């Protein structure tokens, strides 16, 4: 049978080869020849970036019809434009203007190269490079940084490297602005002057904009504020610098702002109440004095705080800006970074858990409205995250909605639905958890062994090695 298949394959290949040879014999063959550039020129000897060059080409081959003309425009080893032009017959003419953009990595007085390749129907090609055009950078002696309320000059401080900068600024740690070469008499961007160059954000990078363009936005919550802005007009980058915040050494709840949040519990009961909150720069390993919170051992989230005294606690999380919440009804402090995403953080959402505080109670509900409903996990090391919480697993087939009583949860890559970790990809840490069926959609689910042992658990997930631990600590 194998020999039969082999023989059929050989005969098939021979048939294909025979047909190809016949087609080759039947097509018209032309004598060996090479295309000739009768004319090839760029009209401009000198341009400024942003101008265009004018290419004119005439090509012929008296013996063999032409097939196509390849055109490549290159500046400083960067491909500006590439196109293939179909050519027919023995003669062809082509002309076109190509814009040479002002963009990143464009040096002053650079050679604009036009690479041409004319090819006939037999595949013979003739190549030519035109390089008579020199491109110069537009003269920009100064740049104006324009916010919604003010205009600040960024003078040229390093002409060789095209660096513009201004110091002694008093911006906060978030600032939005545009950059322009010309202002009107009102110290606003002059949108009417066609020679004005205005920079904003284009696809999250520095680029040219009109009056509808996106503002440049710099944010660094680790700074007191931006006191220096630097524009690198060769690499087309802009950066801000400023004094670094010092991690907080005290946490005074009385200075927090009020915010009304609604929380839906595991029984689907929604409660709206007033929380207190503040954004605070917290440092890993920094000990803080806590004010306005009683019984710290029962009131500080053990994920992020190690209580060291009657009114002191050490922060365990990575240094950064956190939103700190305090719920007066529970006398409990939560911390999170609402905008954090994987791999900087993981989030746990589900049912069957609540804060690690007495009196213990389940508060989660597969929702994202308040910190009672989900857990912001602490990043312990690369790929490893943990959370500490009260867990209670109940099985009651007679309940109206039995799933609300169980422990069932999943790790998410952000605060909200979307990217997630599938429990079925992980080895279960012990007999207390399982990922039983496809219908659970990859949740970590409590087993019958978890029912008699409610308590405070430390849940750790290692996404790199696909391992978890689930350990009762109280």
Image: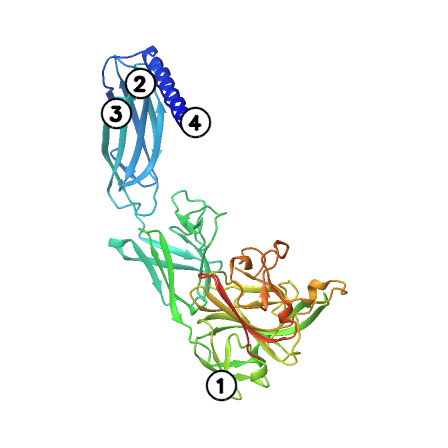
Q: Residue at x 51, y 78 (%)?
A: 305
Q: Position of residue 62 (x, y in %)?
A: 25, 12
Q: Pointer 2 and pointer 1: residues touching (CB < 8 Å)?
A: no
Q: How many residues crowd mark 4 within 10 Å: few (<14), some (14–19), many (20+)?
A: few
Q: Earlier in the sequence, mark 3 or mark 4?
A: 4
Residue 245 is drawn in which quadrant? Answer: bottom left
Label 2 SS: loop
Q: Residue furthest bottom?
A: 310
Residue 43 in sight from this viewpoint: no
For disc 3, the marked residue is 40
Q: How many residues crowd mark 2 within 10 Å: few (<14), some (14–19), many (20+)?
A: some
Q: Pointer 4 and pointer 2: residues touching (CB < 8 Å)?
A: no
Front residue (pair 91, 10): 10
Q: Report how far apart the C-alphas of labels 4 and 2 lie in the structure.
A: 46 Å
Q: Report how far apart the C-alphas of labels 3 and 4 lie in the structure.
A: 64 Å
For disc 4, the marked residue is 1
């Amino acid at each position: 049978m194998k020999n039969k298949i082999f023989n059929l394959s050989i005969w098939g290949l021979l048939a294909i080869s025979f047909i190809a040879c016949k087609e080759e014999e039947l097509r018209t063959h032309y004598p060996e020849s090479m295309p000739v550039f009768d004319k090839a020129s760029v009209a401009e000897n000198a341009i400024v970036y942003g101008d265009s060059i004018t290419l004119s080409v005439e090509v012929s081959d008296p013996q063999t019809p032409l097939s196509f003309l390849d055109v490549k425009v290159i500046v400083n080893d960067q491909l500006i434009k590439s196109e293939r032009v179909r050519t027919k017959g023995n003669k062809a003419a082509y002309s076109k203007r190509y814009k040479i953009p002002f963009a990143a990595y464009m040096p002053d007085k650079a050679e604009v190269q036009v690479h041409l390749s004319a090819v006939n129907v037999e595949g013979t090609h003739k190549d030519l490079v035109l390089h008579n055009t020199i491109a110069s950078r537009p003269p920009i002696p100064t740049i104006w940084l324009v916010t919604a309320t003010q205009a600040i000059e960024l003078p040229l401080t390093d002409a060789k490297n095209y660096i513009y900068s201004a110091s002694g600024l008093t911006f906060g740690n978030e600032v939005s602005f545009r950059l322009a070469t010309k202002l009107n008499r009102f110290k606003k961007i002059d949108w009417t002057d066609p020679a004005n160059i205005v920079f904003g954000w284009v696809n999250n990078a520095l680029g040219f904009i009109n009056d509808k363009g996106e503002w440049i936005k710099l944010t660094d919550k680790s700074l007191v504020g931006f006191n220096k802005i630097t524009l690198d007009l060769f690499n087309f980058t802009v950066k801000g610098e400023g004094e670094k915040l010092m991690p907080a050494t005290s946490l005074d709840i009385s200075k927090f702002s009020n915010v009304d949040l609604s929380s839906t519990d595991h029984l689907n009961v929604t409660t709206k109440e007033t929380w207190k909150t503040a954004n605070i720069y917290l440092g890993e390993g920094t000990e803080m004095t806590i004010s306005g919170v009683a019984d710290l051992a029962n009131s500080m989230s053990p994920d992020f705080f190690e209580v060291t005294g009657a009114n002191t606690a050490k922060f365990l999380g990575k240094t950064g800006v956190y939103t700190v919440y305090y719920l007066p009804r529970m006398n409990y402090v939560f911390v999170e970074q609402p905008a954090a995403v994987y791999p900087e953080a993981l989030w746990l959402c589900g049912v069957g858990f609540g804060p690690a505080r007495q009196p213990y109670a389940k508060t989660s509900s597969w929702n994202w409205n308040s910190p009672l409903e989900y857990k912001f996990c602490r990043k312990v090391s690369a790929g490893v995250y943990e959370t500490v919480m009260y867990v209670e697993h109940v099985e009651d087939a007679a309940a109206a909605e039995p799933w609300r009583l169980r422990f069932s949860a999943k790790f998410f890559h952000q605060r909200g639905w979307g990217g997630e970790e599938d429990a079925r990809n992980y080895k279960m840490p012990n007999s207390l958890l399982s990922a039983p069926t496809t219908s659970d959609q990859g949740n970590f689910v409590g087993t019958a062994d978890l029912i008699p042992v409610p308590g405070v658990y430390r849940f750790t997930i290692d996404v790199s090695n696909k391992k978890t631990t689930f350990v009762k600590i109280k």
